Amino acid sequence: MTSTDEFRARARAWLEQNAKPFDEAADYDLEGTAVPLEESKRFQKALWEAGFAGITWPEEYGGQGLGPAELIAFSEEAADFELPTGPFTIGLGMPGPTILELGTEEQKKRYLPPLLKGEEIWCQLFSEPSAGSDVASLQTTATRTETGWIINGQKVWTSGAQHSDYGAIIARTDPSVPKHSGITMFIVDMSHPGVTVRPLVVATGHAPFNEVFFDDVEVSDDAVIGRVGEGWAAAVVMLRHERVTIGTGTRARSNPLGFDSLLELARARGLNDDPAVRRRLALLYARESALGAYGRVLHEESMAGVPIGARGSAAKLAGAEQALWAADLAQDLLGADLALGGADLERVVMAVVAAPGNAVAGGTNEIQRNIIGERVLGLAKDPGVDRNTPYNKLKLSR
Amino acid sequence: MSLIFTDDQKSLAQTVKRFVADRSPMPRVREVIGGEHAYDAEVWSRLAGDLGLAGLIIPEEYGGAGATHADLSAALRELGAGLVPSPLLACVLTAGALLALDDEPAKHDLLPRLAEGGLVGALAVSEPGERHWIPGTPATTATGSGDAVTLSGTKIAVLNGAEAGVLLVQATGPGGAALYLVEGDAAGLTVSRDAGVDPTRSTATVTFDGTPARPLAGDAAAALDRVADLANLAIAAEQSGAMLACLTMTTEYAKVRYTFGQPIGAYQGVKHKLADMYNRWALSDAALREATRAADEEPAKLGAAAAAARALTSSGYLTSAKETMLLHGGIGFTWEHDAHFYYKNAIAGNVLAGDGDYQLDRLADKLGV
């Protein structure tokens, strides 16, 4: 037995003792409220004490100092269980690795161990109401003071802000240079009185995200992650970790717009003998299984050492298109009953309403197409007419 | 087995790709289809013999290489990318039908000759006025018994019917629909090559008028069901290769064609269409990999996986070939440009061995919808 096999066996044994088995039929926890926060913190602490938190992080910052093989082994075993670690996903996946990569020795010692031990929760503060696809045009400012900086502005689409102790924020520190050059990343204390968190209710009626307002929020000089004016590079580092976080996600819940669900719906409604419906269900299956096969191809290639590069965008785009396509089919199966609603249809109707979200969250379909065109196919970059213009001379949405 | 190519499969694909570039580049394809023969006999003999493609998936006991469907699909992608006219598909289907039957004498007689490429086989199933490419009860009839069986009727869209040394013909005999073996030079056989839309593929209308035939032992319906899967695998492989060729050709053009001071690929109107072409190819190709994996190691899933792959590649290739013409602008609509050959190949390939609705009906059947 190799040391990785031993690690895997130890992880399996611990998970069987301490975690609930994965329940495919359970609903998505849309607002992150299914598990009490205290239970999540307790579980994360137990995970760390057992040696399964920060598997690849250095020991001096609370990590286990192991390699990617152990991380993969743990992820594979963990996929069979419900891990109530949702509140720590952002911190461990994005700000944590970014601080590890770019942070000062003091920052690493101060912030990484409490994160691993489940004592402090983090959020990521990038998107703004007027800066979505073009995040680098952000308008939140950080103005120099004698001892640090004062932050003013608004962030949006912030997961977990209501629970967070700290946030990683990017703000404009120099408006006189082109937009990518005048940004700095800071650690911000979310308990500062100038920080206001408001739930953001989306089309489904749920509030999975927040808006966060900054009103004269002071941060000190040692809150800068990386260097002043190099916040865009730090953001790119963090987004690279975000893609890894999303790409290595856990097992999927049963999908109300998947082939199995819609076949059941068609049968329940006596439509499965209709030739046109049969063909659309068959095509749904073909598309869905191709999407699954493409994911496996990318996974196998990355395991074989072939870089995935920007092809993750192809999978992301295909998944978003698939959700919209399946939502159209579900609507046609439901017909007029869609308008009537009713408890037995709530799950599928909610999925239809939620479908467009897939084509926006984590980069719109248009942005994914730009990425595929430029980074997979090597087409000329979008001209980016604002690339060399000082930020304070740009036309911006207000 | 995995979904990604082994080193051997990569090497086979490279070999076939180099062969296509050397021996059957598009200017040569144009010469061939402008001539009187359906394909270049020299190219076919090398593909079949030197590269061993005709016998690739025929078991060794019948003179083949006993390779996998994934191996064959690696080669077919390259032939599809180059629109190489050849009777390979017809021969693969003929061999597949024979292998699924129980007629050992016919297998031992025909399969080794098919494997070395000396014999071209064709499968005659479709009939005029019948929407399904495999009729349930063919109008073509077989009468007589023993050594005195004869066929009467008409078969259409017979792939390489005009070049075939033997035909496997589906006909209704005394015991129902069965498969019969007809020699290419049999009496009462009339073969007339079609003027189809796709000049890279040769099909024929074949009439039988008291034509001598030999009944083949075995379950014809099961054998033809197997043939439908093999056709879906092979056509999907050719189409995946052709889709990638269209994408590559159009991407290169979008990098060198300038309008309004920029390469056209910089504009989202063009870039996004190319991104969609990429995704159509990537997903179709992944579906094909899953289908060949099923063929090689999980036969119970082959029917659904092959129909699913075919449903995606045929419609996807048609869209991509059309976009290839459109994104090339005026030049893409000229005879001089190659785009129209891909478009025609896609149009014909979309309905070959069962159209889109047929594939989706077949998939729904296999899935128990």
Image (spheres, grey):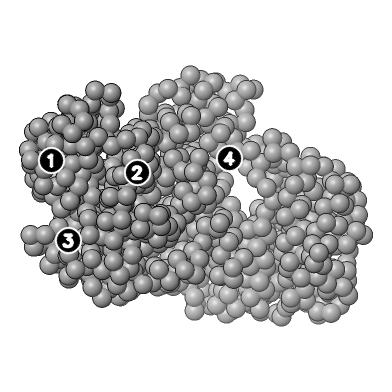
Rendered position, B151 above or below A340: below
- Badge 3 density bin: few <14, some 14–19, many ≥20, Cα 10 Å: many
The residue that mark 3 highlights is B39
How far across and down, in percent of the image, does residue A85 sit? Answer: 80, 51
Kindly report which numbered mark, 4 or 3, lies closer to the viewer in this rendering.
Answer: 3
Of B328 and A138, the residue lying toward us: B328
Point out the image quarter for the C terminus of chain A: bottom right
Chain at tag 4:
A
N-terminal-most mark, 1 or 2: 2
Q: Which residue is mark 2?
A: B104
Q: Which mark is residue A384?
A: none
Report, in whole angstroms, how far the alpha carbon at label 1 lies from the one at label 4: 55 Å
Q: Which residue does the numbered mark 1 point to in the structure image?
A: B206
Verify CB contact (< 8 Å) between mark 4 and mark 3: no
Tag 1's secondary structure? Answer: strand
Badge 1 and badge 4 both on one subunit: no
Q: Residue at x 53, y 36 (%)?
A: A259
Which amino acid type is shown beneath numbered disc 4?
Ala
Which residue is labeled 4 in the image?
A354
Which of label 1 and label 2 is nearer to you?
A: 2
Q: Chain of mark 2?
A: B
Q: Position of residue B41 (x, y in %)?
A: 17, 64
Seen at 33% across and 40% down, the residue is B103
How far, Cα to Cα, is label 2 from label 4? 59 Å
The answer to whether residue B162 is visible is: yes
